[in-house]
Amino acid sequence: LNILGGMDTASSGQVVVDGNDVTKYNKQQLVGYRRTDIGFVFQFYNLVPNLTALENVELAVQVCKDALNAGEKVGLAERKNNFPAQLSGGEQQRVSIARALAKNPKLLLCDEPTGALDYNPGKQILQLLQDTCRKEGITVVLITHNSAIAPMADRLIRFKSGKVVEITENPNPTPIAEIEW
């Protein structure tokens, strides 16, 4: 995820996103790329502690031009005025997802986006990610250890010890409603 997000530029090779080689970007171009083209869903949320849930989402909206209204989609309307310390881990995770989606990025990088969520909210978030991906044309890269959700993917890339060991195209992804874990 760091390589795709332009955070690890010391690596050799190319990283081409939307026809542009990110590895050739200077610092200013990388800032613009991360601001407009990339949405991050961090495993540990990275919310601003002195901002409410709504303000954390609005923070992302302020730096992009074609923002989406994602706050309501993650089911936190009644908690929008709470600070991160007043939210459960799952609620914080949903705020993090709403913030990333609000940017309307070309590429959404998700590190264990359902890791802190119970079963039903986890499935709702997976459905939201898939629906948003298809409706808005956002490419979602989801990193997880939960192999049970793999059948929902259009493309599955398996890693072992930092190396790609398998790439599988899935012409008929399993509907999220049918996935169990």
Image (tube, helix red, strand yellow):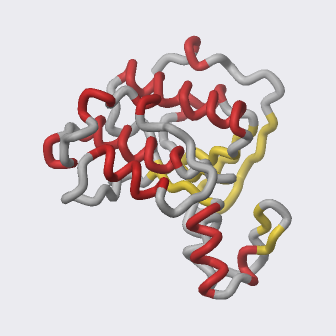
As drawn, 94 above or below 96 = above
Query: For residue 38, what is the image quadrant?
Result: bottom right
Q: 167 or 100, which is in the foreground?
A: 100
Nearer-the-camera pick, 165 or 76: 76
Q: Could you tell whether 165 is left or right of 27 in the image?
A: right
Q: Position of residue 37 (x, y in %)?
A: 65, 60
Asked if 57 appears above or below 71 in the picture, the reply is: below
Whole-percent x, y for residue 167 in the image: 77, 46
Residue 103 vertical placement versus 136 (above, below): below
Q: Which residue is at 47% across, 59% downward?
A: 62
Quadrant for the N terminus in the image: bottom right
What residue is at 24 percent from the left and 55 percent from the top? Answer: 51
**Which image quarter: residue 89?**
top left
Displayed quadrant of residue 86 = top left
Q: Nearer the viewer, residue 134 or 111?
A: 134
Give the x, y percent position of residue 141: 62, 48
Q: Looking at the figure, which quarter contains the C terminus? A: top left
Image point (29%, 45%), residue name: 53
Give the residue at x 39% y 47%: 96
